[in-house]
Image (spheres, rainbow, N blue to C red):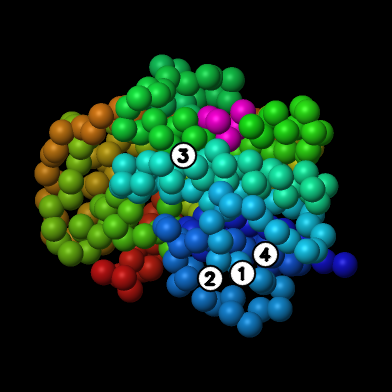
Amino acid sequence: MKQTSVVTGAAGFLGSHLTDLLLSRGHKVIGLDNFVTGSVDNISHLGGNPDFKFIQQDVTEFIFLDCPVDYVWHFASPASPIDYLKIPIQTMKVGSLGTHKALGVAKNKNARFLVASTSEIYGDPLVHPQTEEYWGNVSTIGPRGCYDEAKRFAEALTMAYHREHKVETRIVRIFNTYGPRMRLNDGRVVPAFISQALKNKPITVFGKGTQTRSFCYVSDLIEGIYRLMMSDYDLPVNIGNPVEMTMLQFADEIIRATKSKSKIVFKPLPQDDPKQRKPDISKAKKILKWEPKVVLAQGLTDTIAYFRTKV
């Protein structure tokens, strides 16, 4: 019998790549999405696949499934500043009510549950690089609070179900990820820089460009998440690429990779924007025997090729 996985946010950037990996490894997949930020284009290639079933649904409402379920992967959530500044209440609801409903499925079906958390729970970190033991530096009332606190609540609720209801749970803290199927206008730095470069428009760098990020290619990330779900570890694990670079360095890399004529322009740093972001992946290396393999130049080649079809 094939194992059955439920993926919330299955039409999103990460959810669709996860769905592909699960299908390739012999799972039946039930995908849920309401297309608030997901796209049917990300799963259209799965049409007619007998192992894939799609349900268009808001996961903050009761989820009814009349079949056995082995794994629940909760990936439903807006994940870019543009989205959660525009729809802050929906962002908070999917992190709270949506996580509650997804955990309810796992409890009811006696399934293992994984929540897609984020490096944003560390806020603008006072510890560098960020380890899983760091509690974070987050403004509850700032413009990013709706996303950061929703994810922090999702982690707390997941652990509550683990402790009270003995649900098998996993928590992944995802750091900056890039690759095909990102939305062109989602406001995150990779699609923003690439789309500007492909149009030979000025590349917008915020602040002085000294703030750092660490970019993990999507196939590496999804492999790490799969290994975490299949492991016996129930505390949070960072999954990301520890190679850190400044936004100025990244802008230069994009200009080089796209052979663009773009120039760099500077704008004020948004409120509460993290100054540094770099995962400590010691746990992932030790427990999951995982570390990223795809170097930036290779990952950007595939990502830029995808965006050329969208610009």
Q: Secondary structure at mark 1?
A: strand
Say whether disc 3 or disc 1 marks the residue closer to the N-terminus: 1
The structure residue drawn at horizontal position 53% and vertical position 30%, both measured from the top left corner, is: 152
Q: Residue furthest top?
A: 126
Of the two numbered discs 3 and 1 in the rendering, the one whose residue sits closer to the viewer? 3
In the rendered image, is residue 90 in sight? yes
CB under 8 Å between discs 3 and 4: no
Nearer to us in this view, 74 or 107: 107
Query: Image quarter for residue 302?
Result: bottom left
Q: Earlier in the sequence, mark 1 or mark 4?
A: 4
Q: Position of residue 173 (x, y in %)?
A: 55, 36
Pointer 1 local density, CA inside 10 Å: few below 14, some 14–19, many at least 20: some
User: Decide: marks 1, 4 in contact (CB < 8 A)?
Assistant: yes
Q: CA separation, marks 3 and 1?
A: 24 Å
State how far apart marks 1 and 4 are (Cα).
6 Å
Contact? badges 1 and 2 (CB < 8 Å): yes
Name the kind of residue labelled 4 in the image. Answer: Ile
Task: Locate the C terminus and report the quarter of the image it occupies.
Answer: bottom left
Q: Secondary structure at mark 3?
A: helix
Q: Amino acid at mark 3?
A: Met
Q: Is residue 90 left or right of residue 18?
A: left
Q: Which mark is residue 275?
A: none
Q: Name the residue that disc number 1 marks.
A: 54
Crowd tier of the residue under label 4, counting other residues whose Cα lies within 10 Å: few below 14, some 14–19, many 20 or above: many
Pointer 4: what residue? Answer: 30
**Would you name the residue on which mark 2 appears?**
43
Q: Is there a contact, CB below 8 Å, between mark 3 and mark 1? A: no
Mark 1 and mark 2: Cα distance apart in space? 9 Å
Query: Crowding at label 2, few (<14), some or many (≥20) Cα neighbours within 10 Å?
Result: many
Q: Identify the secondary structure beneath mark 4.
A: strand
Mark carried by residue 92: 3
